[in-house]
Amino acid sequence: MSAVLEPVVSPARRLGTLDVVIPVFNEERSLVASVEAVVAHLEGLPLVSTVTVADNASTDGTGELADELAAVHPTVRVVHLQEKGRGRALKTAWSSSDADVLVYMDVDLSTDLNALLPLVAPLLTGHSDLAIGSRLARTSRTVRGPRREIVSRGYNYLLRGAMRARFSDAQCGFKAIRRDVADRLLPLVHDDAWFFDTELLVVAERSGLRIHEVPVDWVDDPDSSVDVLRTALDDLRGMARLGWSLVRGRVPVGEVAAELGRVSRQGAAGGLSAQLAGFAVVGVLSTLAYALLYLGLRGPLGAQGANVAALLLTTVANTAANRRFTFGVRGPGGAAVHQLQGLVVLGAGIVVTSGALGLLHEVAGTQHRGLEVVVLTAANLLVTVGRFLLMRGWMFRRGAARAG
């Protein structure tokens, strides 16, 4: 890493410090012109600014050119990495910076630099935690080929459907983050390549942090070496890994929300749509387990006995799973109370399902086990609605995501 020189202070009023990171790999043809354009633009902003070139294990003359730029411009620093990976480069550069706001932009400068100040302003004022440029906003103006357009839009639609993301453009190479937020989130982001952006945004959003979006003017770089289809496949694998980690409760989003103070701990556990999704997954698994237990216990215990036993066993597991995955409650504190409350809810379930079973035997005059499972499943669906309302409004209304 080259020596870091004292940045030149803009003559305008100081509003904060900014570090613009440009990850590069074998970009000797465009590096000098791009960095000098960014330096010139930053000199006109009311900010103390630094430009960091993150040399991403280049094999051409990129590293040497970056060092020459740092020697000429007091506001340029260089970070040399031994391994490739855009995410790795950003983690390293951002982690070594003490600026108030950390920025990332592509070396091709596809995004109009006039969007930089609108990008960072909400972060400097504390209004937002992260900011992204969006090529998909209604007022954005973009120029790019049909293949990139289709892949980009398809990926972002999939991201909103599968991950419940509310931001519009995960992949635009024009983002900013407050340093205190970066310090907390970067250790939670495992991807070191192209999925880094998406993972950072999803974790931030699930933590209740505020993401500001800026419509951008964007022109596709025809010489870009990015393999769009391969990157898209890697992103899909990243989505699967991240989704599973969130379902398993391995990402401490509640802790992040509590520490950074953007939302209440209850809000960090997820909104209604997130809770419904988690409850539905747990419910499907519980229903399958109930049916198997009922059929297995039907012989030795009889219909009513098998129903009660299967309900009791699945309720304990259902309460524990919803406590952790649906409502974000971590740790042993209050677990026993929640199980007792679950048993109270179970009592209502037993009344409804036993009544339905007795009605079947009385009216239809049959004890066909398959028909019993169908009737009991239908009755349990009615009970499920009430269980969700009681869990959300009574059992876990103050649920918080705490580390176990």
Image (cartoon, rainbow, N blue to C red):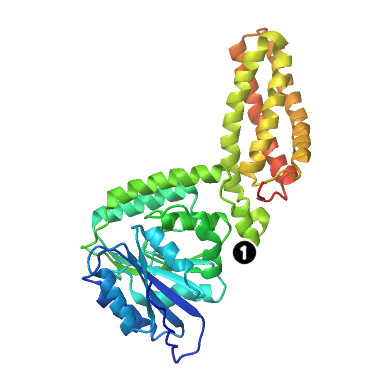
Instruction: Return the x and y of residue 26 as percentages of the image width and height.
Output: 25, 64
Q: Amino acid at mark 1?
A: Leu
Residue 298, picture quadrant: top right
Direction from residue 126 to residue 119 in the image, left or right = left
In the image, residue 225 sits, relative to residue 48, either above or below, namely: above
Residue at the spot x=62%, y=59% of the render? Answer: 257
In the image, residue 397 sits, relative to residue 360, either above or below, namely: below
Residue at the spot x=54%, y=64% of the render? Answer: 183
Most extreme residue toward the bottom is: 11
Viewer can see residue 356: no
Q: How many labels, in total?
A: 1
Direction from residue 309 to residue 247 in the image, left or right = left
- The quadrant of the image that shows the N terminus is bottom left
Residue at the spot x=30%, y=79% of the render? Answer: 69
Instruction: Return the x and y of residue 182 as percentages of the image width and height.
Output: 51, 64
In the image, residue 46 sits, relative to residue 112, either above or below, namely: below
- Element under disc 1: helix
In the image, residue 80 sits, relative to residue 352, either above or below, namely: below
Viewer can see residue 2: yes
- Find disc 1 in the rendering and name its residue: 260
Residues packed near mark 1 inside 10 Å, few (<14), some (14 to 19) or many (20 plus) = some
Instruction: Return the x and y of residue 324 as percentages of the image width and height.
Output: 64, 42
The one of 404 and 141 positioned closer to us in this rendering: 404
Instruction: Return the x and y of residue 220 as percentages of the image width and height.
Output: 26, 64
